[in-house]
Amino acid sequence: MIEVRDLHKSFGPLAVLKGINLSLAHGKVLVIIGPSGSGKTTLLRCLNLLEIPDTGSLGIGGQRVEFAAGGGVPAKAVRALRLKTGMVFQSFHLFPHMTALQNVMEGPVTVQKRSRTEAALLGRELLGKVGLAGKEDAYPHQLSGGQQQRVAIARAMATSPEVLLFDEPTSALDPELVGEVLKVIRQLAAEGMTMVIVTHEMKFAADVADQLVLMDGGVILEQGPPEQVFDHSAHPRVRQFLNRLGGEE
């Protein structure tokens, strides 16, 4: 489903990703953790080409893109890969002048050229799925942070992507609103949705991940099932990071 091979990304002289290799099977959940500045979000943004890697290769489903130093990526290839992903940002990024339903409809109508009637039916179904039936006509400013994030999840799902990407989906939420968003993500995992999630919620990561990746300094220090990373890692930097987190709880 997802194959990343020797992926590199720099911003000027700063090397942010230094040869990332990972794979994820269809219907599985990959959770990426690590300290701030480790490259987690950059890796996630590379998966749907919001950031174009410098070198390496990326495959999602049947679509594969190769990156070479100094070489561009055809717009057609970028579009084809992006159509396989749906992205949920930490700051929601809803259109403020659109209702919840209109936000969810936008992708199917604009990108997929579906009729507004069909898109509205889909939008209502997806808002119900994330627990927001009855909120179709509410504008973002009328919704709590947790509700806005659930609209964003419904919007990401509206184009029927093969993979959902989450960039710290609870970091902008008040603590009491975190649970409602994590509940929706757990539900999607139980239904077999392929997902890549960057998060700082360690208990959630241990619960939902099939595969856990711990990054630091632009490289993957450890990857494997959550119990392996959390309980049996022999890497001193991994133990230091996890022990520090444990001390904060």
Image (spheres, helix red, strand yellow):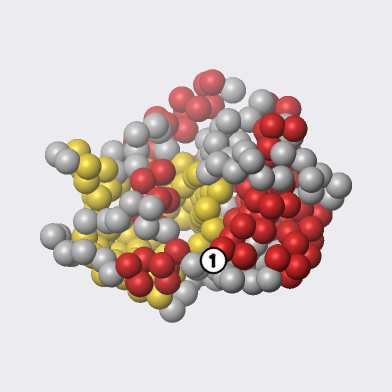
Residue 94 place in picture, x, y as percent: 60, 43
Secondary structure beneath dot 1 equals loop
Q: Is residue 36 visible?
A: yes
- Name, please, the residue furthest toward the top: 248
* Residue located farthest toward the right when viewing the structure as drawn: 134
- Residue 234: % across, % down: 38, 43
Is 59 displayed left or right of 140 in the figure? left
How many labels were placed on the picture?
A: 1
* Side of 122 relative to 37 (left or right): right
Q: Which residue is found at the position 47% from the left and 47% from the top?
A: 32
Quarter of the image where one finds residue 240: top left
Which residue is nearer to you in this view: 33 or 140? 140
Q: Is residue 204 visible?
A: no
Q: Dot 1, how many residues are within 10 Å of its Cα: few (below 14), some (14-19), or many (20+)?
A: few
Residue at 74% across, 34% down: 143
- x and y percentages locating residue 207 in the rendered image: 64, 47
Name the residue nearer the viewer: 111 or 46.
111
Image quarter in which the C terminus is found: top right
Write down the quadrant of residue 68 in the picture: bottom left
| Residue at (62% x, 65% y) in the render | 108
- Residue at the outermost bottom position: 62
Residue 235 image offset from top left, x and y in percent: 35, 41
Please report the residue visible at 73 percent of the width from the left and 70 percent of the height from the top: 118
Dot 1 amino acid type: Val
Is 69 in front, or is 239?
Answer: 69
The residue carrying mark 1 is 111
Q: Is residue 78 above or below residue 243?
A: below
Tell which of 224 and 13 is nearer to you.
Answer: 13
Q: Is residue 52 above or below residue 36?
A: below
